[in-house]
Amino acid sequence: MSTASKSYIEVDPQCSVLLLDRDGVINQRIVNDYVRSWESFVFMPGVLDALSLLSKTYYGIAIVTNQQGVSKGLMSEEDLQNIHHAMVQEIQSAGGQIHAIYAATELASDYPVYRKPALGWKPAIERDFPEVDFSLSTMIGDSDSDIAFGKALGCNTVGLGENLTKNIADFHVNSWKSLLSKYAIDVH
């Protein structure tokens, strides 16, 4: 359900950036655990086709993800980098692009600067995408912290799935296929 009067997501290919959470958005979330290796990484249905299409629509695409499993000692920084490398390769093979990945490996209990919804990654996004207009950019997430992060940046926000407890996203969809219908572009 939308809390705004918008009926579609407005994008300007010169200055719009698509920001994505990872677990629950790009890959299937492992309940009460972490994706610790590439072997446990499973893409969400329709995400590869969607990212191929959206890569032609947005100025840039970045992943903003909380990955405290590293600080908990459940995986190494190298493990996380290997997962991201393989993920980007698969997305590129399907015709999509990921231009940057911002991974907060801090513990939630350590007053983190980079964990969503904190805005620690904002300067890096502005540096990596100097033409970014957050008001024409989009944050897609499956948790309240993802949506709060997008709202704090001034982005359009899309809640994907059923994990959101607050109804603050501009759009809410249950699948990548239904998400694509929110764009004023030909998706066929």
Image (spheres, grey):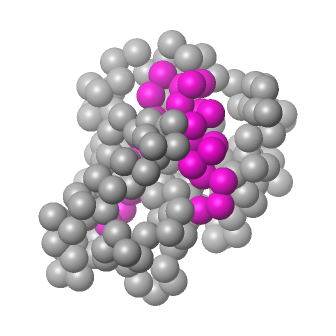
Q: Nearer the viewer, residue 147 or 14?
A: 14
Q: The N terminus is located in which quarter?
A: bottom right
Residue 80, image x and y in percent?
Answer: 25, 64
The answer to whether residue 146 is above or below residue 30 is above
Please state if 70 lies on the left or on the right of 137 as rendered. Answer: left
Q: Is residue 163 visible?
A: yes
In front of the other: 13 or 4: 13
x, y percent for residue 177: 75, 50
Residue pictured at 29% horizontal, 53% vertical: 85
Tell me residue 132's x, y (percent): 43, 21
Identified at 59% across, 33% down, the residue is 54
Asked if one can make out residue 168 in the rendered structure from this viewpoint, the answer is no
Please say whether residue 54 is one of the residues in the magenta stretch.
yes
Answer above or below: position of 119 versus 66. Answer: above
Q: Is residue 55 magenta?
A: yes
Image location (x, y in percent) of residue 31: 51, 83
Residue situated in front as seen by the camera: 131 or 98? 98
- Side of 78 where 86 appears, left or right: right
Which quarter shows the C terminus?
A: top right
Judged from this view, the residue extending furthest toward the bottom is 32
Please identify the quarter of the rendering in which residue 120 is found. Answer: top left
In front: 22, or 135? 22
The image quadrant of residue 173 is bottom right
Residue lying farthest front? Answer: 93
Q: Is residue 157 above or below residue 27?
A: above
| 95 sits to left or right of 129 | right
> In screen coordinates, is 80 left or right of 182?
left
Tell me what residue is drawn at x 37 percent, y 48 percent.
88
Bounds of the magenta segment? 44-67
